[in-house]
Amino acid sequence: MKVLVTGSNGLVGSYVVKQLLEEGDAVFASSRSADLSGFKSSGYHFIQCNFTDPYAVHTAFERIRPDVVVHSGAMSKPDDCERNQAEAYETNMAGTVQLLLNAADYKSFFIFLSTDFIFNGKEGMHKEEDAPDPLSYYGKTKREAEEAVMEYEYGWAIVRTVFVYGKPLYGRDCFLNMIAKKLQNNEPFRIVNDQERTPTFAEDLAKGISAIINKRATGIFHLSGEEVVTPYQMAMAVAGFMNIQSHRLKPVSTAELNELARRPLKSGLDVTKAKKELGYVPVSFKEGLKRTLAG
Ligand SMILES: NC(=O)C1=CN([C@@H]2O[C@H](COP(=O)(O)OP(=O)(O)OC[C@H]3O[C@@H](n4cnc5c(N)ncnc54)[C@H](OP(=O)(O)O)[C@@H]3O)[C@@H](O)[C@H]2O)C=CC1
Ligand SMILES: Cc1cn([C@H]2C[C@H](O)[C@@H](COP(=O)(O)OP(=O)(O)O[C@H]3O[C@@H](C)C(=O)[C@@H](O)[C@H]3O)O2)c(=O)[nH]c1=O
């Protein structure tokens, strides 16, 4: 099976590529910049492509003729999206439409990575059918892209996930590694403690996406962890794992942190459907943390 994975230089894309290679698929990894990975297997191919460029996307699809597209590429920093709204729309919405148009030519099965930030976070533990109400421009672009995906005729799945963490395969640190470095250097850092999340271990997410591909499961799926924690609680778990009692991490409120993009306060996702229909079994946060930070 030939799978095109966009966003392969990112945290999520890197784990999806790894998982699919392990399963023996022909993986066409794609990012805007040059390949960061060290993947060497014969099933691995890299295509540098800006998916907002219609000609580049057309050429890539002509070459690959993918059976499946996993669209993980995005402008994924909510504050950047708030600041540069035209670029965020072009990347997250128009780029997704460009990929959908080309995927239709090859009747590829299309999987789109979306986010808990499409919800307003008033209730928390959202189910797939809950009404979207994004608070940030990032969330709005992802929701509009979801709506475009739902119009696709040849089989689609939308995977919503939350605060993904895992040992970086390459590329930038995840939140947990970033906190570990602050602790090691005894740096001061203010961390929000009134936002609830169900953080997602990247390996679990990649396995869930693979199950969707193998079952050709269509519709919306929530794939995240099951435990509700705040970023400050996550950071304290890192300190506990590292056995550091004295540190300069400080809990703050959302109002005090005063980030540019509004974030949902209660944003956990309910994964009951994925457990039932995909056999999705996420690890505990404790286990995910251990596997992220261990040697
Ligand atoms: N990380 C998280 O906690 C969560 C992520 N998500 C969603 O999951 C997906 C992946 O997130 P994550 O891995 O963290 O993202 P990253 O920011 O780590 O990676 C983004 C990837 O997208 C690529 N990309 C961005 N713009 C373009 C473009 N115009 N053309 C081609 N490639 C582009 C980047 O390429 P390059 O680096 O080469 O520029 C990079 O490979 C996103 O859709 C995000 O919205 C949802 C919920 C939580
Ligand atoms: C920079 C900073 C962040 N934080 C918190 C806010 C946030 O909860 C967490 C991580 O910060 P980030 O800005 O990376 O994450 P943030 O953008 O809030 O997280 C989101 O990412 C996008 C892609 C999603 O779709 C969401 O699911 C979600 O995980 O750390 C602090 O507490 N203090 C700080 O100084």
Image (spheres, rainbow, N blue to C red):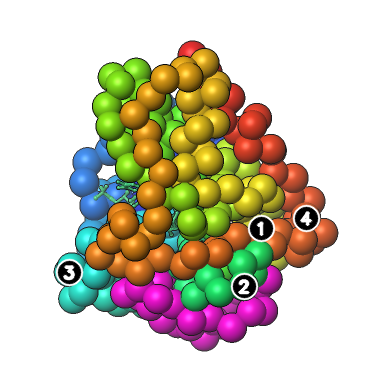
Q: Is residue 150 visible?
A: yes
- Residue situated in front as seen by the camera: 199 or 51: 199
Q: Position of residue 263 (x, y in %)?
A: 41, 65
Q: Nearer the viewer, mark 1 or mark 4?
A: 4
Residue drawn at (52%, 16%), measured in percent from left and top?
A: 243
Q: CA distance from mark 1 to mark 2?
A: 27 Å
Q: Which residue is mark 3?
A: 84
Q: Are marks 3 and 4 in contact (CB under 8 Å)?
A: no
| Residue in front for this viewpoint, 205 or 270 | 270
What residue is pinned by disc 1?
Answer: 212
Q: Nearer the viewer, residue 209 or 20?
A: 209
Q: Quadrant of ligand 1?
A: bottom left
Query: Mark 2 and mark 4: span between their CA atoms?
Result: 21 Å
- Which class describes the residues within 10 Å of circle 2: few (<14), some (14-19), or many (20+)? few
Tell me which amino acid carries mark 1: Ile
User: Which numbered circle lies on residue 123?
Assistant: 2
Q: Which residue is mark 4?
A: 275
| Quadrant of res 123 | bottom right
Q: For the image shown, how many numbered marks are present on the structure? A: 4
Chain part drawn in magenta: 127-156
Comparing labels 1 and 2, the label whose residue is closer to the camera: 2
Q: Regarding mark 3 in the picture, which secondary structure is present there?
A: loop
Residue 144 painted magenta: yes
The residue at label 4 has a CB less than 8 Å from ligand 1:
no
Of callouts 1 and 3, which one flags the residue occurring earlier in the amino acid sequence?
A: 3
